[in-house]
Amino acid sequence: MPIRFAGIAAIALLCALPAAAAQTASSPVRVVGTIEKASGNALTVKTRQGDTATVTVAENVQVFDVSKATLADVKPGSFIGVGAAPQTDGSQLAIQVTIFADVQRGLGEGHRPWNRPNTTMTNATVDSTVTGVNGQELRVKYKDGEQKIVIPPDAIILAYSVGDKSELKDGANIAINGAIKNPDGTYNAARVNVGRDVVPQ
């Protein structure tokens, strides 16, 4: 059964958007849902809120697939994003782990609040991994510091891979973390995440 994932690196992905004079109408927003109709660069999306959104993607739109992964895929050297709950011992208990594609390495690197109450987001490189009492323990490093991450057995683990524009077709479940809303209510997007065996949330 498909699982749902949140935009674990939403802040990071916004940093990847190119500056464009035509996209000054508003700040980037998330558009999540299912493509009802794809016609060239125009997508009609049924959002998770039940609305219909019209999205125009860039001619050179970046597409990334999001799939389920396992703890075995989290290895030293991997660049990951971790949504977690801070623990009293200073560690971070992972709720969701996303393994980025190599071309995404460095996006949003650092440690900051996540988009859920009392949680954190850490985008960093795995330095080491050991098995601990409460689950797999990672030491991750970023340019301004490091964190100890504990990954319990029930944590959601996902992986990004480079996709193709042809995947933006009718019925595809997508998440756009950085759509620009135009004055007429339509959206522009430079990148789109496509859920393979997961459903965006």
Image (cartoon, helix red, strand yellow):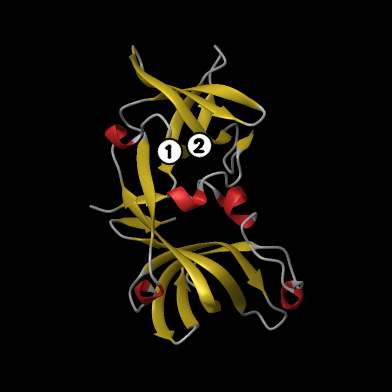
In the rendered structure, find residue 35 and report the number of the disc placed on it.
none
Q: Is residue 79 left or right of residue 153?
A: right
Count numbered badges in the picture: 2
Q: Is residue 57 above or below residue 133?
A: below
Q: Residue furthest left?
A: 1
- Crowd around label 1: few <14 · some 14–19 · many ≥20 (10 Å): many
Q: Is residue 167 left or right of residue 26?
A: left
**Separation of disc 2 and disc 1 at Cα?**
5 Å
Asked which secondary structure carries label 2, the reply is strand
Q: Are marks 2 and 1 in contact (CB under 8 Å)?
A: yes
Q: Residue 172 appears in which quarter of the rendering?
A: bottom left
Q: Which residue is mark 1?
A: 96
Name the kind of residue labelled 1 in the image: Gln
Residue 186 in view here:
yes
Residue 48 in view here:
no
- Where does the image place residue 173, in percent across and percent down from the top left? 37, 66
In the rendered structure, find residue 83 and report the number of the disc placed on it.
2
Asked which secondary structure carries label 1, the reply is strand
- Where does the image place residue 186, in percent across and percent down from the top left? 61, 80
Name the kind of residue labelled 2 in the image: Gly
Residue at 44% over, 55% down: 201
